[in-house]
Image: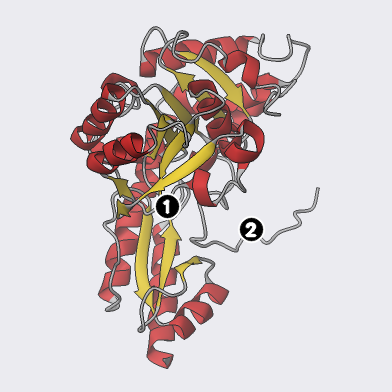
């Protein structure tokens, strides 16, 4: 088949824009051919479940799903009662970028908490939970956190532990949107479970799509009693794939080996190089660089011209009187040449302004 896109076009718009890692593609090919049990009874899904127990603990249960939004919606439905609400950061994907999926499918209200660089403070969690403790309001059933955050920052283990402790003391379960959990774990120098279930996190939306997969997401729950309805929610949430082996094969390629670490490490290192290159042009970074995303302030005209040459997104078009805030995301396949090319483009466009 003739490609319908130009493979030479590369940028920093999102790690979603990258293709699939060759090892993941190879895993898909290996899973093809012959007939196996459908709807998750296949050997790839069973092997994945064992692999996830190695990462997150011997008692975890999991559910393979198709999308990150589907993972979040399914997990949060499993953790909450119908009348409860969910706390999220004011930057959360579940709040801004999932088209009200949790409200629409799960019927669950989402309450935003203020953040600093995308990070939630334990005191704000306690304040919000106590404020909702009324028959006139939707009581809080779960807290969802993003690791790494939408602003490219990563919760420290101490910070996460404090958040889990506050939530559990108040009877609230904790979910982690781990679309980029691999990047955060590599940045912190820990395993996937060490930054989630080992700290008491109740459920994780573990993402593979942004880290070398194509359509590869899975919900991981600390134990069967934590979310007894998980298996029953996948189908009505429209996340059940009949040929589950092809989703599981991708996840097994990533998390059944050290591929998740290698891809995340490559992306994180590329982001660090990108941050240094951007700073060298005189541009100011607006957020700490702690995973695979770089945020910076650019004059609006410069951002528009540069993005037309090397794709990236304007994050906040009204960031300041001087310019807009932009987001640059490195991927598992970002090269030194990609970074150098962007630095050259940025230098040229700044000179024109």
Q: Alpha-carbon neighbours of circle 2 within 10 Å: few (<14), some, or many (≥20)?
A: few
Q: Earlier in the sequence, mark 1 or mark 2?
A: 2
Where is residue 123? Give x, y as percent: 23, 41
308 lies above or below 291: below
Pick the front one: 71 or 106: 106
334 lies above or below 202: below
Q: Is residue 294 visible?
A: yes
- Left/right of residue 207 with respect to residue 286 in the rendered view: right
Where is residue 108? Give x, y as percent: 56, 34
Q: Quadrant of the C terminus?
A: bottom left
Q: Is residue 212 visible?
A: no
Q: Alpha-carbon neighbours of circle 1 within 10 Å: few (<14), some, or many (≥20)?
A: many
Mark 1 secondary-structure assignment = loop
- Left/right of residue 250 with respect to residue 324 in the rendered view: right
- Residue 139: name its quadrant: top left
Which residue is disc 2 drawn over?
A: 7
Pick the front one: 233 or 9: 233
Where is residue 231? Give x, y as percent: 60, 14
Which residue is disc 1 drawn over?
A: 91
- Left/right of residue 199 with respect to residue 324 in the rendered view: left
- Residue 105: name its quadrant: top right
Mark 2 secondary-structure assignment = loop
Is the C-beta separation of discs 1 and 2 under 8 Å? no
Residue lying furthest bottom in this view? 352
Which residue does the image show at 47% across and 30% down from the upper left? 206
Q: CA distance from mark 1 to mark 2?
A: 32 Å
Where is residue 224? Give x, y as percent: 47, 8
Residue lying furthest left in this view? 158
């Amino acid at each position: 088949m003739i490609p319908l896109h130009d493979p030479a076009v590369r940028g920093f718009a999102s790690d979603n824009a990258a293709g699939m890692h060759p090892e993941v593609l190879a895993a898909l090919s290996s899973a093809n051919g012959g007939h196996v049990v459908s709807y998750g009874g296949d050997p790839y899904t069973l092997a994945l479940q064992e692999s996830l127990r190695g990462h997150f603990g011997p008692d975890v249960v999991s559910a393979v799903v198709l999308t990150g939004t589907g993972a979040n919606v399914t997990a949060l439905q499993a953790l909450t009662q119908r009348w409860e609400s969910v706390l999220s950061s004011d930057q959360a994907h579940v709040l801004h970028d999932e088209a009200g999926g949790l409200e629409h499918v799960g019927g669950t209200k989402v309450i935003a908490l203020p953040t600093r660089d995308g990070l939630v403070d334990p005191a704000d969690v306690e304040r919000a939970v106590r404020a909702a403790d009324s028959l006139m309001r939707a009581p809080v059933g779960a807290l969802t956190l993003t690791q790494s955050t939408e602003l490219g920052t990563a919760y420290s283990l101490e910070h996460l532990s404090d958040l889990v402790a506050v939530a559990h003391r108040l009877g609230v379960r904790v979910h982690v949107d781990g679309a980029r959990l691999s990047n955060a774990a590599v940045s912190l120098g820990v395993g996937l479970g060490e930054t989630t279930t080992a700290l008491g996190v109740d459920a994780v939306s573990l993402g593979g799509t942004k880290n070398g997969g194509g359509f590869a997401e899975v919900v991981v729950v600390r134990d069967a009693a934590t979310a007894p309805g998980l298996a029953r929610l996948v189908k009505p949430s429209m996340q059940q794939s009949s040929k589950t082996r092809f989703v599981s094969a991708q996840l097994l390629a990533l998390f059944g080996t050290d591929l998740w670490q290698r891809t995340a490490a490559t992306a994180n290192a590329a982001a660090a190089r990108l941050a240094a290159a951007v700073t060298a042009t005189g541009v100011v970074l607006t957020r700490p660089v702690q995973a695979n995303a770089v945020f910076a302030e650019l004059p609006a005209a410069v951002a528009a011209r540069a993005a037309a040459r090397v794709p990236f997104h304007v994050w906040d078009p009204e960031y300041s009187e001087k310019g807009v805030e932009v987001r640059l995301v490195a991927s598992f396949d970002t090269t030194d040449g990609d970074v150098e090319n962007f630095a050259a483009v940025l230098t040229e466009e700044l000179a024109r302004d």
